[in-house]
Amino acid sequence: MKFVQTGLLYVFGSLCLLSCNHDIKKTSKNEAKNLPNIVFVYLDDLGYGDVSAYGATELNTPNIDQLANEGMKFINGFATSATCTPSRYGVMTGKYPWRNQKAQILPGSAPLIIDTTEATLPKMLKESGYQTAIIGKWHLGLGYGDLNWNGHIAPGPNELGFDHSYIMAATQDRVPTVYIDNGYVDNLDPDDPIEVNYEENFEGEPTGYNNPEMVTLEADDQHNKTVINGIPRIGYMKGGESARWSDIDMADHFLEKVQTYLSDKNESEKPFFLMYTMQQPHVPRTPHPRFEGTTSMGARGDAIMEADWVVGELMKSLDEADILENTLVIFSSDNGPILADGYEDQAEELLGQHSPSGNLKGTKYSLFEAGTRVPFITYWKDKIEPGVSDALVSQIDLFSSLAALVENESSTTDSQNLLDVFLGKSKEGRKDIIIEAMTRTAYKKGDWVMIPPQKGPKIMWGKGIETAFSKKFQLYNLAEDPRQDNNLADSNPEKLAEMLEGYEAIISEEFQPNRIKK
């Protein structure tokens, strides 16, 4: 199988080997040659309806479609949260993010929210003989607070089990706008040190407020701080001119790092685990100029086209390295879609007939279905038979499922072993799941979803997003009402009581700070 388009090669730094943590149970090692490589492709803000294999008619995503059509396409697959940091926490730890109060959207200068003594997905795989790497977005915090961006930035991905890391600290719309290579800012001039502050600006540094003539992409108040490459950001930054990234080249840059990482893997005696955490289509949407105009939807649509091309280049690189047939590829998104999210890029105005949420209700930040139900695909050439599964699966289940794959006995609080489901050998998924949006929670079981009364705005100010936060119980039968328009809480008290019982069996009162008691 050949995936479309051509790739670039780019040389990067050395691997940093770190020991695994004692929290992971010891287990006998498999011979490396018997273990598959694992690549987890994780997009940012890609919606359930943003992929043509999932029903999009105004966008054509042939490379993602090929994964879906030749692998197992899950139509009931979930991120653990409707926002990025907590969702990534769930993947890394195999735990629901609401168990950690720090697992909320973080500023770029936030400390690491996963303790270095905690079991993590890369630690578990490293324990089982894997080389481990993350390339792309991080957004789980770095250091212990009060970071020195000009020295060794730790703890971070390397201290959580990744042998190699090449990341951006948080998001493309937050400072610092630099890449971090195994704990050191890439291409930093020591005579031009970096300073970062999320509270106040540095004297003389331009901002979107004070220097509108420098702005090429207008932003809301939250994003209208330090201007870099014509784009105002969240937070203030000074220095590091030589290390600052080029926004339009970001997709190419991360892809080059991935391709270089893969280029020597066919001769390696160890299997590898790669988390490829792409930035598209998160704001600011800055597709390379060669993708501009590839859709009628402006920057957001074009960024999705760029992401699809990147997926094709990744698959071609695996094929050219002669490792595709022994590589399990997992594709998903960290949360649901968002249109207007801080920048004036006409994502709403140019949407046309496209529905980023598909036939579902909700968006990023929302407890409604499309806030956490996302594209979810597993692909393994000649190992996974093509198919469509309606099994309930979650990204937190990757921990226990991959542990089973490599015969590691590690387990975590919430992750379930769904290996046979992910490999297409079973359709018996989860019985139930807790989903989260901005520390609020809801409960899914079968075709039903129950949202308890919660404090919080029904509509997010400035974004027009229906959060599903309400002072009343909500109960929906998704089989009959996928748009969640008909609240059955009053008309079906028996089902509501059953769902509430299941919810409270998982999430105790101490983890429900926003719930309104009835």
Image (cartoon, rainbow, N blue to C red):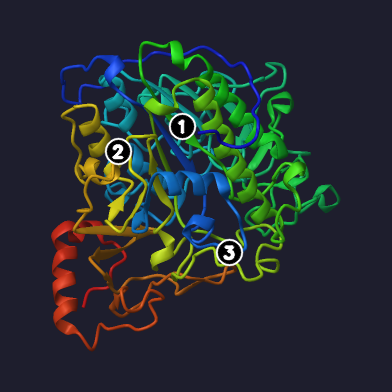
At label 1, which amino acid type do we have? Leu
Q: Secondary structure at mark 2?
A: helix
Q: Is residue 221 above or below residue 400?
A: below
Q: Is residue 279 above or below residue 212?
A: above
Res 314 quadrant in image: top right
Q: Is residue 376 visible from the viewing direction of this image? A: yes
Residue lying at the far bottom of the rendered structure: 491
Q: How many marks?
A: 3
> Alpha carbon of mark 3 to alpha carbon of mark 1: how far?
40 Å
Check disc 1 and report the residue beneath it.
142
Classed neighbour count for the residue bearing mark 2: other residues with Cα under 10 Å, few (<14), some (14–19), many (≥20): many
Q: Secondary structure at mark 3?
A: loop
Classed neighbour count for the residue bearing mark 1: other residues with Cα under 10 Å, few (<14), some (14–19), many (≥20): many
> Alpha carbon of mark 3 to alpha carbon of mark 2: how far?
36 Å
Check disc 2 and report the residue beneath it.
93
Q: Quadrant of the C terminus?
A: bottom left
Q: Which mark is residue 2?
A: none
- In the drawing, does residue 302 fall left or right of residue 180? right
Classed neighbour count for the residue bearing mark 3: other residues with Cα under 10 Å, few (<14), some (14–19), many (≥20): some
Res 17 quadrant in image: top left
Residue 113 is situated, as x and y percent measured from the top left of the image, at 37, 38
At label 3, which amino acid type do we have? Thr
Which residue is found at the position 49% from the left and 65% from the top? 357
- Looking at this view, is 377 or 44 the one in front? 377
Q: Is residue 450 above or below residue 157?
A: below
Check disc 3 and report the residue beneath it.
57
Q: Is residue 333 visible from the viewing direction of this image? A: no
For marks 3 and 2 on the same chain, the one whose residue lies earlier in the sequence: 3
For marks 2 and 1 on the same chain, the one whose residue lies earlier in the sequence: 2
Residue 47 is situated, as x and y percent measured from the top left of the image, at 50, 58
Residue 139 is situated, as x and y percent measured from the top left of the image, at 48, 40
